[in-house]
Image (cartoon, rainbow, N blue to C red):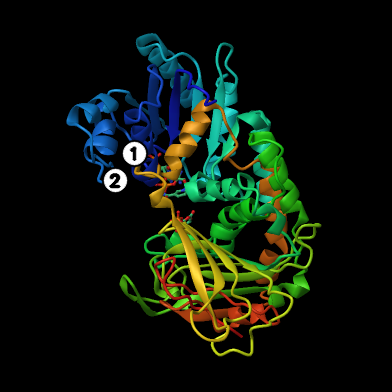
Amino acid sequence: MTKSVDPHTLVIFGASGDLAQRKLIPAVFDLYRGGYLPEKFALLGASRTNMTDEEFRDKVVFNNEHFDRKDCTDEQVAAYAEVLFYQDLASYDGEKDINNLGKRLKKLDKDHGVGSNYIFYLSTPPSLYSTIPPALAKAGLNQTKDGWSRLIVEKPFGYDLATAKQLNEDIQRYFEEDTIYRIDHYLGKETVQNLLVTRFANGFFEPLWNRNYIQSVQITAAETVGVGTRGGYYDGSGALRDMVQNHLLQVLAHVAMEPPIRADAKSIRGEKLKLFQSLRSIKRADVRNHVIRAQYTEGRTKGGDVVSYRDAEGVPEKSNTETYVGMKFFIDNWRWAGVPFFVRTGKCLPLKLTEVVITFKNPPQAIFSEFDNYAMSSDNRLIIRIQPDEGMALEFGMKVPGEGFRVKNVDMDFFYRDLTSNDVPDAYTRLLLDCMKGDPTLYARGDSVEAAWDFVEPILQAWKANEVPLFSYPAGTWGPLQSDALWSGVGDGWRNPSTSLTEKKHYTKL
Ligand SMILES: NC(=O)C1=CN([C@@H]2O[C@H](COP(=O)(O)OP(=O)(O)OC[C@H]3O[C@@H](n4cnc5c(N)ncnc54)[C@H](OP(=O)(O)O)[C@@H]3O)[C@@H](O)[C@H]2O)C=CC1
Ligand SMILES: O=C1O[C@H](COP(=O)(O)O)[C@@H](O)[C@H](O)[C@H]1O
């Protein structure tokens, strides 16, 4: 049964910024026109830029190029704008400012009957994630007498293990864990959620989903874009922090966790924590053999010519920040003992795609191998395409009609678009709705975030101390050749696919 949404006010700190304009305000509009918002609802933008309510509405609705008006009337857009308000602040944590915000919330209740339930969305620079919650608490807005208060925290959640722990501590002092919503937009992707349905709503995957039948698992998140104008932010982060510690470990958890006893927040998040705790820590001395880091040099991608990372806007000339990570690791539990997991992500690769590839073990005896064109022996794969071209393909060998027993690999595929004619909701739309309903299932829990940081910590330390080389790769290629060597002795290789899920596959065979 789906929960309903109480009347409430959504407060967006940093409302004058890029994220609010590009993602948040349009996502709330999707909820509005989909009929998901309660009748009594207000969105209050808050930031230091001086704006009236009308100016805010002009900026984020009427003059917002990211606002999708497809299939909606001007009346709908205008009616949505009416529930948007704006409060300017001299600072985000000043007592006077937050008290004024509190007064404004009371006035919104008085004028529009929205009650005293609040969602506070931290869409500011991360340096403010620790300072806004105590300011809210001082004004009594973290726990209201006759309502609820929830806090959404944007990424990045910490910079390393120590800062993530500190941030948890800073926030949990003022908000109960079950009211803290750490956003990871990959969890809002339908196809990431579908990993759970694929595994746990079907009987036939589960018996095969373990070390007895699976030879390796690989997860790729490839991007064609470089850092663009985000060099200033990205250079302080790098691919490991930006993509692996959060998004890709969350995808991994959906692929590898044990079946939860129920599809609720406690059960699912509990299993994820266990999975993160089972990741075999990569010792600092082993980092060079398990993790490849690299940076793109100039080249050509789908978007045209690309300057090298070090020449990108906002990037220091001698930057050692990685734009590519490829890694191999193990999960120490009964299900996965001995199965290698491979994860890679990179900017300026040939394609934009995220996918999971499960490679199954060979049959115990290759009785058809004497016939010509016998399929490669490791050709049983399940390819789960997270984006784009969302869907799945199962590869297996079939007999070619005619004499003898010639085996050819074929695909059986499913495309997510065949499931429904409805547009797949944007990740932010789904995640915001869940928070409004008070359901944190698709948000990261504090202990899991720390466990994920714990796993990447030795890698960060080895890199910081320059104990391992930083390789390079030309923009528009599948990353450094050294990354292929991670597969040595495993038998498969990185799948470097074409855009279509079912087009001819490419593996970097060793
Ligand atoms: N943009 C994106 O696509 C994504 C962003 N995020 C995260 O979301 C958060 C917001 O991102 P985004 O909107 O891009 O960021 P912005 O840089 O656009 O900042 C948001 C707002 O914060 C205020 N601000 C900026 N710098 C400072 C400062 N030094 N001190 C105080 N206030 C400041 C500004 O408002 P004002 O000056 O009016 O107060 C600004 O409009 C960030 O933490 C980012 O990491 C996460 C995923 C994607
Ligand atoms: O969080 C981030 O994700 C995007 C990639 O997200 P996707 O939904 O387009 O796959 C990445 O480009 C960005 O660097 C990172 O901060």
What is the three-letter code of the residue carrying label 2?
A: His
N-terminal label among 1 and 2: 1
- Toward the viewer: 143 or 482? 482
- Which residue in the structure is indicated by mark 1? 26
Look at the image and tell me in which quarter the N terminus lies: top right
Q: Secondary structure under badge 2?
A: loop
Image mark for residue 66: 2
- Toward the viewer: 157 or 498? 498
CA–CA distance in space, label 1 to label 2: 7 Å
* Image height of 205 relative to 405, above or below: above
Residue 463, how many percent across, how many down? Answer: 65, 70
Quadrant housing residue 461: bottom right
What is the three-letter code of the residue carrying label 1?
A: Pro
Residue 239, how many percent across, how many down? Answer: 54, 64
Q: Secondary structure under badge 1?
A: helix
Task: Report the side of 504 relative to 275 (left or right).
Answer: left
| Viewer can see residue 290 | yes
